[in-house]
Image (spheres, rainbow, N blue to C red):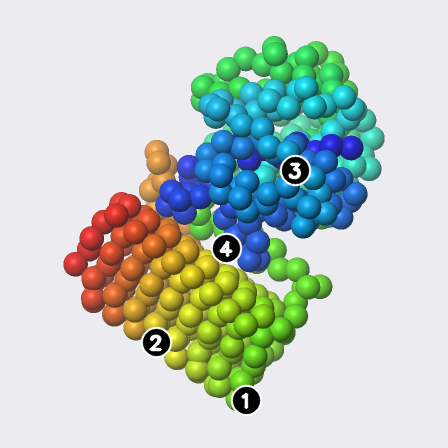
Amino acid sequence: MKAVILAAGEGRRCRPLTQTRSKVMLPVGNRPFLEHVIRALAVNGIEDLLVVVGYQKERIMNHFEDGLRYGVRMEYFHQHETLGTAHALKTVRSKIDDEFLVLNGDNLVDGRAIHDLLSADGDNVILAALGTHSGDYGVLSVEGDCVTRIVEKPGKPCAGILNTGAYRFSPNIFDELDKTPISDRGSYELTQTVGRLIDSGKDVRAKVTSGTWSDAIFAWDLLMANSLAFDLGEMRVDGEIEDGARIRGAVGVGKGSVIRSGTYIIGPVVIGRNCDIGPNATILPTTSISDSVRIGSSSEVRNSIVMSGSRIGSGTIVTDSVIGSSCALGDQVMLETGSSLVEVEDLILRAEFGAILADGVVASGRAFMHPGTMVGATSRIGPGAVIRGWIDRGSRVI
């Protein structure tokens, strides 16, 4: 069986992190979303992957190449215009001659969820999840296991059976793609295609997964996905732990990394290769630290994501935050967590997190970031500056 992975979009609502990479390449558990999807497919014996790319496609293709190191074969298809998921699926039409899977490359999914999708009855199956959400997912009306209606993004908080955006289809779905009308958002959506199947009386089943599934609609949602992404079975300490350092719980430390004396780490925490942590630093659950990160003495990082090549000075506090690649935080910088109103595109939302820093941000010593701060790529924050809200890409704050 083949699987189609939709990975062409930017993920605009995850800005500023997607200013320099697509959402599928954002890391949770120290792996890009797309890698989690690939691994979940591979463990279920699905090796032929058709990946639809678009925005920042070179970064995806350079990272995964032909997929052989993940035990799969990856073939790439370019969606030249991001006109929706139904339009994206059309690009692989010539490669499909049997039933197949469709998955979003920017969701966290595990092998159990893929197994559930494969084992479900029916020619057209939607992988579903039970949960509450803020109105940004499709909600399924189900009788038995038959889907009777899809309410796409109702726009208000609700609970129920959520459409994860993962499907198993027969090749007949391509006949329906040509009939899919353009949506109010100006794109051709796969949910509308499935809705037409339901309206025409075709059998569409829902399979509620017992596995892991998570999405990140907004940048701060990465923290929740990250908390679910730790592969406890692969946690190993391959780096150097100096005398006087203490590690508790599930902690992974990559080769070439050094955990210096007096540092205290409570898992689940994963630390990549060639990192230098401490001395006397504190790393608390649920934190992911990518390769080649330096965290200075007496700093604390809690429930955060620190991407590759970033530097955090001494006495700095990072809580409930996402730090992009190649950022530099000086000494005694504070990223304070709490509830705040956050503006994302045309929405004003209440969220609780610290700060989101895109790639290449520099914050000088004693800078203070209020809860809900979003800093665009390559911005510079001066010594002692106090910032809040949205800071545009390339800004200079003094």
Q: CA distance from mark 3 to mark 2?
A: 43 Å
Q: Amino acid at mark 4?
A: Leu
Question: Helix, strand or loop at disc 4?
Answer: helix
10 Å crowding of disc 3: few (<14), some (14-19), many (20+):
many
Q: Looking at the picture, does residue 55 appear above or below residue 382?
A: above
Q: CA distance from mark 4 to mark 1?
A: 31 Å
Q: Amino acid at mark 1?
A: Asp
The residue identified by callout 1 is: 243
**Residue 36 position in % (x across, y down):** 63, 48
Q: Nearer the viewer, mark 4 or mark 1?
A: 1
Question: Which residue is more in the foreground, 38 or 58?
Answer: 58
Mark drawn on residue 223: 4
The residue identified by callout 2 is: 314
Question: Helix, strand or loop at disc 3?
Answer: strand
The residue identified by callout 3 is: 74
Q: CA distance from mark 4 to mark 2?
A: 24 Å
First reached walking from the N terminus: tag 3 or tag 4: 3
Q: Nearer the viewer, mark 3 or mark 2?
A: 3
Residue lying at 49% horizontally and 36% vertically, measured from the top left = 57
Question: Which residue is more in the foreground, 386 or 260?
Answer: 260
Residue 215 falls in which quadrant of the image? Answer: top right
